[in-house]
Image (cartoon, rainbow, N blue to C red):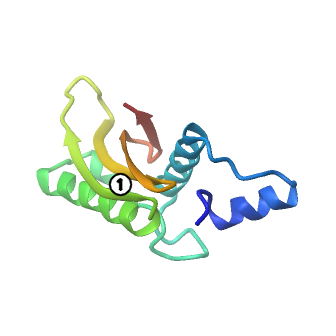
Amino acid sequence: MSNERLLKRVKQWSMRQVPASDHGVYVESVLADLSMLYNTQHGTALIDNTYGLPDFTNIFNNLTPPDIDMMQRAIMDTTNRFETRLKSVTVNYEDRKNEFGLLRFSVTSQLMFLDGLFPLNYSVLLNGDGSVAIEVK
């Protein structure tokens, strides 16, 4: 099984490139795909109405613990469903009072690469404007 998604392999094939087997390139590819996944809102992707995350922009005004739990669950469920190269995904909220207008969730997972599993830990940063950033730990 290849380390790249089908459309990336097709693009590489058309450009006569050999798929990369370098771990760093592979991790960058997964993180780029996660960034695209997290920055897509439900209902906007033609492939699947559930692709991406729900719209969280209105939640920032009156944030409650159930809202944080819902966001945490949405990140974990979306990652498990659409990024199958990651296994054992856990998502935890990081309460940081000094980051106004930003919610931080830490993600720990195992990345399938070649014949093994390797740890991949990163943070998902939800901004008040609806954008999502990924920060590698």
Q: Name the outermost residue toward the left.
A: 65
- Name the image quarter holding the N terminus: bottom right
Residue 137 x, y percent position in the rendering: 37, 31
Seen at 70% across and 59% down, the residue is 8
Q: Amino acid at mark 1?
A: Phe
Seen at 30% across and 59% down, the residue is 76
Residue 16 image-quadrant placement: bottom right
Foreground residue, 18 or 128?
A: 18
Foreground residue, 50 or 82?
A: 82
Q: Name the outermost residue toward the top.
A: 98
Foreground residue, 15 or 81?
A: 15
Residue 106 image-quadrant placement: top left
Seen at 28% across and 52% down, the residue is 59
**Can residue 64 be seen here?**
yes
Foreground residue, 68 or 1?
A: 1
Give left or right: position of 40 versus 13: left
Q: Would you place residue 131 above or below residue 14 in this image?
A: above
Residue 63 x, y percent position in the rendering: 20, 47
Residue 52 x, y percent position in the rendering: 46, 63
Residue at which label 1 appears:
56
For the image shown, how many numbered marks are present on the structure?
Answer: 1
Q: Would you place residue 56 above or below residue 7 in this image?
A: above
Residue 128 x, y percent position in the rendering: 38, 41
At mark 1, the secondary structure is loop
Seen at 28% across and 43% down, the residue is 105
Give left or right: position of 38 versus 102: right
**Can residue 54 be seen here?**
no
Q: Name the outermost residue toward the front.
A: 115
Q: Few, some or many C-alpha atoms within 10 Å of disc 1 (few <14, some 14-19, many ≥20)?
A: some
